[in-house]
Image (tube, rainbow, N blue to C red):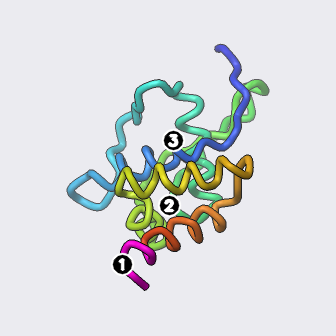
């Protein structure tokens, strides 16, 4: 297994949430999630992070037998907060504008990202 440095990737977080939301029954598909340009280890680690952030209900699948493995999880469904985040981040133009804004300062927390997305949408609505 090739080890990668695990940094939080908000594009991957968004992609996982969008993919999980796309299932017609409200539960994420229980097949192995595939997202182009990301390894299974990266995807699983970010699903684990989604659970920590309260954006998704997950099953922790971390095994301690492999000391070189990253924390891992499978997604069950999105939480209310996960749906709220997607409602802010769904539209590509809004998402890219928020990322550009945050990249100017070198990064930001999830709460700041949500505030930036909210500000962009409020401005679009004239609020």
Q: Which element carries disc 3, helix, strand or loop? A: helix
Q: Is residue 36 magenta?
A: no
The residue mark sitting in front, 2 or 3, is: 3
Q: Residues within 10 Å of mark 1 (few under 14, many from 20)?
A: few
Q: Nearer the viewer, residue 110 or 35?
A: 110
Q: Is residue 76 above or below residue 114?
A: above
- Hey, which quadrant is residue 121 in on the image? bottom left
Specify which label sits upstream in the sequence, 1 or 2: 2
**Left or right of 82 on screen, residue 18:** left
Q: Which mark is residue 57?
A: 2
Q: Give the residues in magenta.
A: 122-127
Rendered residue at 60%/55% (across/down): 101
Determine the residue located farthest toward the bottom in the rendered image.
127
Q: Is residue 125 magenta?
A: yes
- The Cα atoms of the two marked residues, 1 and 2, are separated by 31 Å
Rendered residue at 58%/57% (across/down): 51
- Quadrant for the N terminus, please: top right
Q: Which mark is residue 12?
A: 3
* Residue 114 horizontal/vertical position (percent): 56, 67
* Residue 32 horizontal/vertical position (percent): 40, 33
């Amino acid at each position: 297994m090739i080890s990668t440095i695990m940094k939080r990737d908000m594009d991957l977080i968004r992609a996982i949430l969008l993919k999980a939301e796309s299932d017609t029954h409200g539960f994420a598909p229980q097949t192995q999630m595939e997202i182009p340009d990301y390894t299974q280890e990266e995807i699983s680690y970010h699903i684990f992070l989604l659970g920590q952030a309260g954006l998704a209900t997950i099953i922790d699948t971390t095994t301690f037998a492999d000391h070189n493995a990253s924390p891992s999880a499978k997604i069950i469904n999105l939480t209310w907060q996960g749906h709220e985040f997607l409602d802010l981040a769904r539209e590509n133009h809004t998402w890219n504008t928020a990322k550009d804004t945050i990249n100017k300062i070198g990064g930001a927390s999830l709460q700041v990202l949500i505030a930036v997305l909210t500000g962009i949408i409020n401005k679009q609505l004239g609020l």
